[in-house]
Image: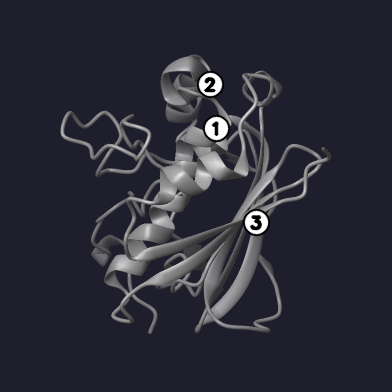
């Protein structure tokens, strides 16, 4: 049912703000602060959303696959409900702005939860802002789409994709070169770091050469 955006309650992100350029720029100015430890921290920021879904989906748990690609990109695919997407009073499809705006629960919040690496959780916008590109593919019961971002800014519209499977989200991102060069890390490290999320089983598919 189409409803006015003004009636939508903000829980994790501000529905009225599709892109927060100042927020994204502040992250890019200080990558060491927002991605301590490099790429593994960014992976945990994404997997944390899959863990949220797994804990509250009513099925007793969930599963996600982290794929490490040869080009240095990483994809995280989960079996959750997919990112909230609605139709406003003008019939326009609006997706929750998880990539391009701050997560109201965590960013700059002194009581933000810690990720398994011991660092504060700040949200998906950190991953988007610190990536050369990010592609967000979303499958929900009410429609499926994909969208591309560059350093957190959308560079494509929502593009419909076939709803050819169960609901869920795939986030594939290529971190900035400085972060990719920050140090070697293994698939085993990611599995170990994700272990505290008891409701989520994490599989790592390492396709990198060597």
Answer left or right for 25 relative to 187.
left
Q: Nearer the viewer, residue 61 or 31?
A: 61
Identity of the residue drawn at 48% across and 64% down: 94
Residue at figure coordinates x 39%, y 51% from the top left: 195
Q: Earlier in the sequence, mark 1 or mark 2?
A: 2
Residue 129, percent from left and from top: 55, 32
Indicate the secondary structure of the residue bearing disc 2.
Answer: helix
SS state under label 3:
strand
61 lies left or right of 155:
left
Local packing at callout 1 (Cα closer than 10 Å; few below 14, some 14-19, many 20+) is many
> How far across and how far down the image is residue 199, in percent?
33, 65
Disc 1 from disc 2: Cα separation: 6 Å
Left/right placement of residue 55 relative to residue 1 reads left
Residue at 42% across, 71% down? 62
Q: Are marks 1 and 2 in contact (CB under 8 Å)?
A: yes
Residue matched to label 3: 147
- Picture layout, residue 150 above or below residue 59: above
Residue closest to the eye, 86 or 81: 81
Q: Which mark is residue 28?
A: 2
In terms of sequence position, does the residue under pointer 1 or pointer 3 come before the other?
1
Residue at the disc numbered 1: 129
């Amino acid at each position: 049912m189409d409803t006015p955006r003004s009636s939508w309650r903000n829980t994790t992100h501000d529905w009225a703000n599709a892109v927060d350029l100042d927020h994204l720029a502040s992250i890019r100015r200080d990558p060491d602060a927002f991605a301590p430890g490099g790429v593994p921290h960014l992976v945990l920021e994404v997997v944390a959303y899959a863990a949220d879904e797994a804990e509250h989906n009513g099925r007793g748990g969930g599963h996600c696959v982290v794929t490490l690609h040869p080009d240095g990109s990483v994809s995280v695919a989960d079996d959750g409900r997919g990112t909230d997407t609605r139709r406003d009073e003008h019939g326009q499809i609006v997706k929750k702005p998880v990539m391009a705006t701050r997560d109201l629960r965590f960013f700059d919040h002194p009581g933000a939860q810690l990720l398994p690496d011991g660092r504060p959780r700040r949200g998906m916008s950190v991953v988007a802002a610190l990536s050369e590109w990010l592609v967000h593919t979303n499958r929900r019961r009410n429609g499926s789409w994909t969208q591309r971002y560059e350093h957190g800014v959308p560079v494509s519209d929502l593009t419909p994709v076939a709803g050819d499977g169960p609901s869920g989200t795939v986030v594939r991102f290529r971190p900035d070169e400085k972060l990719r060069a920050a140090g070697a890390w293994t698939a085993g490290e990611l599995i170990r770091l994700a272990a505290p999320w008891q409701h989520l089983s994490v599989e790592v598919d390492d396709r990198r050469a060597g």
